[in-house]
Image (cartoon, rainbow, N blue to C red):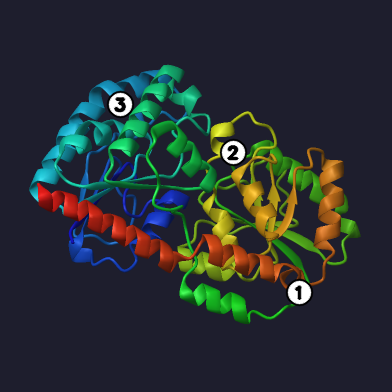
Amino acid sequence: MKLLVATEFPPNASGGGPAVVRQLLRAWPTSDLVWWSGLAEAGSRFGQACAEHACAGIPAKLMPHHRFTGLKSALLERGWAPLASLHLAQTIRRVQPDAIWAIPHNWSILPLARVLPACGVGFHVPVQDYVDVHGQVEKFGRARCRRLATLADRLYTAATTRDATSRPMMADLAARTGAPAAQMLHAGLEAGDFAFLESRPGVAAPEIRIAYAGTILAHAEFAGFVAALQRIRSALPRPVTLELFGAHSYASAPWFDAAWMHEHGNLPEPELLGRLRECSWGFAPMELTDHDPRYNRFSFPTKFITYLAAGLPVIALGHPESSVMQMARAYAVGLATAAATPEALAASLSAALSDPDPWQTFVRGVLRCARAEFDAARMRSVLASCFAQCAEFTARG
């Protein structure tokens, strides 16, 4: 089966969403995989190969990150998107895929929604994040974000098959569109990860090493977490360190202290997993307020699953209704707290971090959660079935 992946990001992009796609394509033959993206490759460090990568070439200077965001967004919508739609349609006609995996990420929503419903090829749509999160309303403009969100919903509804990133998102999409998701599709644990967890011995390590993987999005909560740790560091039974993994450096942040914080950079997935397995806990914060409920309640950060695969109990901090907090509390995978002040958070952390062997305390919850929610082999099987349905649609003409 020839599969076309169509989205904004290139095959070897950093971030949780691209990592999920790469993991689920792990067994897909390179000769049968074609990739279409808006953004060009910056390197091949994650090792995702494909038979062809067709790039619609969003100019890097047009990405609305900081300056002139309204103007850049307008140019992307009115200038780049029509050209990208032609490029995508031409790519589909030339490649003639059996199925399309269409991932509606940010600006790719515009060409995907314009081309795919009438292209004659069955397509599968996962929703990894809603477009109106992470301050993108401020960057893209409220009306434009609303248009993108509406187009993403239409694309999801028109898809041959579909899935979503969390159970709350699945319920929300079904209620609003009437279209059910085949599964909760996210990062998962492989057979080797389960074998590691089941055989991992309890260890009373000489240090309490707390890992954070990825970009910091909940800035206030992260700073509050550091402040709480600072209060209790001297009273803990063992030295505590904060281990930061990801593409961004935080050495200039006001909370950063090189005496007990270490940055490790953006590591390939296998190396990252190995380094995380040297730690004691994984930290997964979400916002404590409901300022960004579309992210808090419906998105699910990949780092949570990565921590489980590494055998790390999770410190979940966030609004009680957030997807992470609901999952952490349902399975007792570690400390789940909504403490909103450094004093209250310090008290919760002091009790949890004083545990000499947290793995033995939470191993049952971690394994139960991983098997029930994040089994990669099961997710691949369901996804393959979705692609087969898409191919059947294409074959019927």
- What residue do we see at 52% from left, 64% from top? 272
Residue 302, image x and y in percent?
52, 53
Disc 1 from disc 2: Cα separation: 33 Å
Kind of residue at badge 1: Ala
- What residue do we see at 21% from left, 38% from top? 116
Contact flag, marks 2 and 3 (Cβ < 8 Å): no
Q: Quadrant of residue 67?
A: top left
On residue 76, the disc is: 3
Secondary structure of the residue carrying tag 1 is loop
On residue 183, the disc is: none
Residue wearing tag 1: 205
- What residue do we see at 75% from left, 41% from top? 224
Disc 1 from disc 3: Cα separation: 51 Å
Kind of residue at badge 3: Leu
Q: Nearer the viewer, mark 2 or mark 3?
A: 2
Residue 339, image x and y in percent?
79, 42
